[in-house]
Image (spheres, coloured by chain):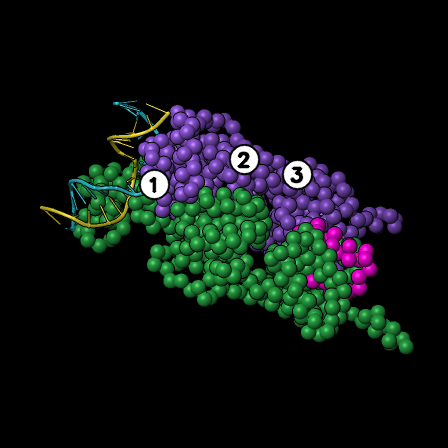
Chain colours: A green, B purple, C cyan, D yellow
Amino acid sequence: MVTIKDVARVAGVSIATVSRVLNDNHKVGDACRARVKKVIKELGYQPNANAQALVSKTPSNIGVVTPKLSMTFFGTLAAGVEKTAREQHYKLLMANSLYETESELAAIASLRANNCHALILHSEYSDEKTLQKLADEMPGLVVINRYVPAIAHRCVWLDNQRGAMDATRYLLQRGHQKFAVITSIYQNGDPQVRLAGTKAALAEQGLQLQGVEESTANIEGGIQATEALLARGVPFSALLAYNDLMAVGAIHALFAAGLRVPEDVSVIGFDDLIVARACRPQLTTMHYPVEEMAAYAAQLAIEQSQPNAEMHAHRTHLFLPQLVERDSVADAPATTQTDKEKRQ
Amino acid sequence: MVTIKDVARVAGVSIATVSRVLNDNHKVGDACRARVKKVIKELGYQPNANAQALVSKTPSNIGVVTPKLSMTFFGTLAAGVEKTAREQHYKLLMANSLYETESELAAIASLRANNCHALILHSEYSDEKTLQKLADEMPGLVVINRYVPAIAHRCVWLDNQRGAMDATRYLLQRGHQKFAVITSIYQNGDPQVRLAGTKAALAEQGLQLQGVEESTANIEGGIQATEALLARGVPFSALLAYNDLMAVGAIHALFAAGLRVPEDVSVIGFDDLIVARACRPQLTTMHYPVEEMAAYAAQLAIEQSQPNAEMHAHRTHLFLPQLVERDSVADAPATTQTDKEKRQ
DNA sequence: CTGAAAGCGCTAACAT
DNA sequence: ATGTTAGCGCTTTCAG
């Protein structure tokens, strides 16, 4: 390994000078600087980041802790953080938490030990108290995709309630009257909020949900939940899914049952992952700007991790989902009731 | 920040003793160890990884460089590396190369400076010479998803030729005679190899491809390429796509043109990403064991990065894709020709 | 403008 | 079994 000493020796200067051309960039003679730069290049010298971090106390590492990197949503989240990391010349460290509080904490500890003063955390299961404690210890911690009131100014999150309301209102506008929801079996956090949003939007029109089914938040879960809805004979022309994966499952189940999407039932998703464009019909869904949010969160984390960072305790960072119209929603079909009325 | 000195002071021992209980775990008295551990816990002491890495020269960092983390394939790749990183108590550093040779190199340099002696690289555009040079400098570098003969023992790759042949033979077995291919416009690396595999399998039966269209390797590209095939009037009952994304696009385009999948044309993909299960019909495809391969590559990189690592220059690391039968392939429909023959 | 020297937090001989 | 000490590679005063 070629060190600063080697460069200094070859260039015939002291290590301090080398260090100066590496950093300061002023207070070094031109001739000297040129020579040093040349040697650096010749030797292929790379400053040792550990040594730098050790002494200069201002390490430029940013960490991400997400449940599972192989899921598109989290990969995209990581990509967003990576974007600002690259722009700011930060190094990106990663760890999966595997959906467990314990490994989540372990991952955070590990990243902290590695000088990640800035850290983006996607936590689903740690309780608010733990999070708050963590945040107190670590000014550069920001929580993404979750709102924790006690540390509101360090939360970058999405207005799920609003998103669900928008989706529901859109369906309402298209003439739908009979709604069903398939949601995550894990009813805390956004599944709950989204469900509430749908109910609220329905209530505005004096309507109620015809049925709700819970299952795992993936394609299989979407299939199961939809089959359950059908088996129970719940009448619905509009189906709101907790996320795109479940929506895709719903479409599969619906077609399997001889129902057409969107002619017989309209389906709407949430997230706008690639699967939304893969299924047929392509899914109308609420776009979740994850990558953008993650990039923003990284920015915030970096700022907050600076020793002189300002505290804006009185504000939070809320993003809005947006409807993406594709092909899984149509106007409500004439309902059974309407048919009867017509016949009369 | 609480350092080893603080712990030593509070525990009333020397820093060496603290260091010992942290590492060795032998040659420390029980009472003493217990006390130190207690203090460590009380103070919430975390060893500074930079200082450790600086002195002990055996840093446990592993890096990943991929083009774009937000794509499922790369996210899954990263997840595989993360898995062995976690098992081996390595830290995972990441960088996107954004499909550019320059930023790819920059990313690698950055990770190296950060003590990543083990490094997994997914490189599509860097030439073999560059890669070889890099590999020479860095024993812990392993290339994934690409075969570079000069550094064969550091390549973890997939038998794309075989995969394409298997897919083609499967279609042949199902009675198909007229084949078309949609592939990536970027014809080097696996697209080329897969195309060659298909041609080879066809040649075994004295058959030839009816047509090939190139486009971008995503859903839109799949649509475009398929439309082009249709527009040119290429006759085919079996369509092989470079990857799942293109296959999904093909399915969309086919249905849009009034053709049914798999009744009128069978479609087969490659990769087995989540989109394969999202589309309707679900895609029959060649499973690419990325996560497994990435975990293996990480293992290999760690081994090779050890100073005393054995060199197995005479061997490489080849994985096999496997056919996953779902619903996008059916037996060949009676061909026009057969119809005529029947009529005669 | 440049060099000497003091650490950053930790590990690993070398002492005791 | 435990303490002392010399660095790891680098940045940063402090002198000159």
In the displayed structure, A41 sits above or below A343; it is above
User: Marks 3/1: CA distance?
Assistant: 56 Å
Residue occupied by mark 3? B322
Q: Which residues are magenta?
A: A218-240
- Name the residue type under label 1: Asp
Crowd class of label 1 (few under 14; some 14 to 19; many from 20; radius 10 Å)? some
Which residue is at 74% across, 63% downward? A180
Residue toward you, B206 or A230 = A230
- Image quadrant holding the C terminus of chain A, namely bottom right
Residue A26 picture location, percent across and down: 22, 54
Have a look at marks 3 and 1 and say if they share a chain. yes
The first of marks 1 and 2 along the sequence is 1
Residue A29 picture location, percent across and down: 17, 51
For mark 1, name the chain.
Answer: B
For mark 3, name the chain.
Answer: B
The first of marks 2 and 3 along the sequence is 2
Crowd class of label 3 (few under 14; some 14 to 19; many from 20; radius 10 Å)? some
Residue B93 picture location, percent across and down: 45, 44
